[in-house]
Amino acid sequence: MADLPSDLVVAGVAPSLDETAAAKVAGRWRGSLGVTIPAALVLLIIALCFIWPIIGPVPPPTGGNILNASLPAFSPGHFLGTDPVGNDEWSRILYGGRASLEIAFAVQAIGIILGGLLGSVAAYLGGWRDATIMRLLDVVIAFPAFVLAVAIAQGLGPSELHTIWALCFFSVPAFARISRAATLRVREQTFMTAARLSGTRFPRMLLGHIAPNILPQLITFALLGIGIVMILEGALSFVGLGVPPPAPSWGNMIAQGQSTLSADPRYVLLPSAALFITVVCFNLLGDGLRARWSSQ
Amino acid sequence: MCRRGGELSSGGPLLDVRNLVQEFEVRAQGGVRSGVVQAVSDVSFTLAKGETLGLVGETGSGKSTLARAILQAPRPKSGEVLFDGVDLAKLRGKQLLQARRQIQMVFQDPFGSLDPKWSVMHIVEEPLIAFRTAERAERRSRVSEVLDRVGLDPSRYADRRPRSLSGGQAQRVAIARALALDPALIIYDEAVSSLDVLIRAQVLNLLERLRAEMSLTYLFIAHDLALVKQVSDRVAVMYLGKLVEIGPAESLYREPLHPYTVALLASIPNPDPTAERAPVTNTIHGEPPSPIDPPSGCRFRTRCPHAQDVCAAEEPPLRRLAEGHFAACHFPVGRGPNPGDAPAPAMAGGAHDAAAPN
Amino acid sequence: MTESLLEVRDLRVDFRHDGRVVRAVDGLTYSLTRGKTVAVIGESGSGKTVSSRAIMGLLPPTAKVSGSIRFDDVEMVGLAEKAMRSHRGRGVAMVFQDPTRSLNPTMRIGGQIREAIQTHEKSSRAAAHDRALELLELVRLPAAKERLEQYPHQLSGGMRQRVMIAIALAASPKLLIADEATTALDVTTQAQIMELLRDLQQRLGMALIMISHDLGLAASFADEVVVMYAGRAVERAPTQMLFAHVRMPYTRALLEAIPRLENESHALLAAVPGQPPNLALREPGCPFTPRCPSATDQCRQHMPAFEEHEPDHQWACWHPCADAVAS
């Protein structure tokens, strides 16, 4: 941590003789608050959205009986009630979460892999290759991306997959930027020169040296960006694109729910609350990992 | 372990640097002019097999740039670097790679030169993997052997990360890595300067032992003249990109010829409290000039207590003034003007007959 | 008014780090007379920097300081921040190792010196400007008037360090602490700066604490030397006495590890094995035991006390070195 003077040699980990057991446990907890708790919450959310609907008693999110429409919360068999066409709201939250998370994970994954690779290669090679790649990406960024997303969705027709393609136009250039900056920093390090002098060639340099050293930053960026992607998906849904109803996603649930906002706000509040909690958890996890990795 | 391809084909020096020039651009930065800095300016010297040549210079002298230029990382602007008779500057791709096996470098920052994500075993193994020498098992045993040589017990250190090493241990890993391919020449670029005093002594002794055991040739770069003198057979002094003096270590100390060498010697803190101390301002004054716009003629003249008009007009060539001892000065210390001395062969900087160690 | 300007007695500094307690300074005692120079010598982890920061009150809030630091008859340990702020600069000033990081790159030199002046006394901008010029001339910065308008990156390392010294002298402190102030400088520049410091000290009657790892520097410039290891003082004596009659094996190891110009090529240095101890793992005995050529079981089990064993010469060792035979 930055507040220790540099001449303090604190190598290795060992308990001090005059420390109480309670202080030791407290120290360990303080460290874990940063990462363990958000990680546990994130895993819980993922389990709920992906696993629970398969193994648990969760009714399907579509094809509900219109006779059961708009039941209030805590009705028998529907503890969050039903939506205006009779679908179980709890089920829609879970399946909606699955859709939103699938999109967010896919977009970030493609971003890290494609964007990360592009930015890293650009930075490592430098020169005209760097300039070309980055200017191409600049074109993508400069393009009114929302218009682009709309065009894709209109042209291809709204679906979860097409939403993912559209949102990649945001994430790939963003990751490329981050990856390029991180790679430039790593490239300056002496161990890179040492590796070159050892005879190591480009593929191994990239995968063996650069990737492990920039991955923490990329992963942190990905986690902090999950929330943004989910909200963007919601924005797309607002204009009728994104995941097409009746299949739920948090984004399209919020979009649809606004028509009944004054009558029954729960159709907006429930997915909003779910989105909010999820985004906060991912952000805490991202922050915690960043703190842990930068102190190493 | 026998050295593959390391036997010298020629009888000449192991390393023969001729008229090496390295430049780089300096971009404008709020008031600082942009321009081209000639970090290494027409430097020539030789290094015989088994010899240790010390290279001394302060900030801006170009000593580190020189080391990197020798290794072609990046390539020098002009000049020749003959390693075992072959000009490295003309080699490309695979051939350069093969030549690089024979020359290795150890850097100043022990931690900066080790990938923080790699284990010690992996770090030392890297050159062996890159050159595809041997199978995994043989590679691993070579790594263990070389870790042992540098005083690190492989069973305790092989799986550690640099983070859990001390400065001295990290530098030993860097040395082990340099030794892995059994090179002929090792360049130490301020390799002990960041280490604590006692650890530094340990590592220096290790370097001596390795040199004797493995018949290595060293180029030892540092800013501490006492340190350099102790490990070297010959010492070269650089100032602002120029080689200003080169000669046997003992001669340089007892009979320094260049005023800058005199200043360096006078600046060394003497660990004898009773010794007489002349103010260093007798030997050098002012501030180092800008490397972008070096002084005309002799680059040291702006700080030299004996500068004359001719020093601004004419750059002094490197002249042989004693057995194996060269200096680039119009008025070498204790010699007065030397109109009779012929310039050394092969242009300024020809120290070729100093190849033989003393 | 006592003779002694600074009296450090049994100083201890503990750090809380990750829930653990690390003792960086473990009982340091020395004193400094007005106008004298003391060199505090040690390697990494010796506690020399931490102890000097304690004198300045510059330790982070995670540090716990105990013991006594009496400066000019005022107790520093436990002093309120407000009083500490006025004491800094006027009583004690510090020059750090890296002038690049201690100077604000976006502010002109003149502005930074003026800021230092105006922190400690009410003066107009013009008066502060004049004083700034005076200070730059005091530290022998060439072309002082032009330098006032320049930015730090336009100056060389040695010049920046002179500016740092000028800033430190702004409020005419009684004590100047040079914390590895020349370590990052070239050897010729280091010599120039050290001579400047000695000259200033004589002219201004200032006391000087030199923190360094370089015993050679101490030999050339200090009146007294305190050697630290693993947070403790292990030997203290006037400079000439220390070098002539080294007692503590660690001090001797330091002396023998310095490369000498007189040594022959390829001479081996008398090197001591091992490395500085882990401060988080404190053993009961003397911390130098694992590396000491004279160590015995007594050293392993009992910490030797830092005491005056010969006139004006203190050390902490069970088996001190005898006087070397004249070589």
Image (spheres, grey):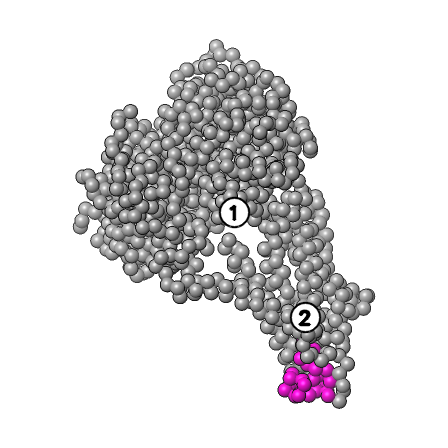
Residue A189 spot, x, y in % from top left: 56, 44
Residue C199 spot, x, y in % from top left: 30, 37
Above or below, C52 against C247 in this view is: below
Judged from this view, the residue extending furthest toward the bottom is A67
Q: Chain of mark 2?
A: A
Using residue B6 as the reference point, say whether residue A114 is left or right of it: right
| Residue at the spot of label 1 | B160
Secondary structure mostly seen in magenta is loop
Magenta span = A68-94
Using residue B79 as the reference point, say whether residue A259 is left or right of it: right
Tag 2: residue type? Phe
Classify mark 2: helix, strand or loop: helix
Residue A123 spot, x, y in % from top left: 65, 47
Q: Chain of mark 1?
A: B
Query: Residue C178's image quarter?
Result: top left
> Residue B240's mark?
none
Q: Residue at x 76, y 86 (%)?
A: A65
Tag 1: residue type? Arg
Q: Residue at x 81, y 68 (%)?
A: A157
| Residue at the spot of label 2 | A50
* Label 2, label 1: how far apart the Cα atoms are: 39 Å
In terms of depth relative to the viewer, which is nearer, A134 or C151?
A134
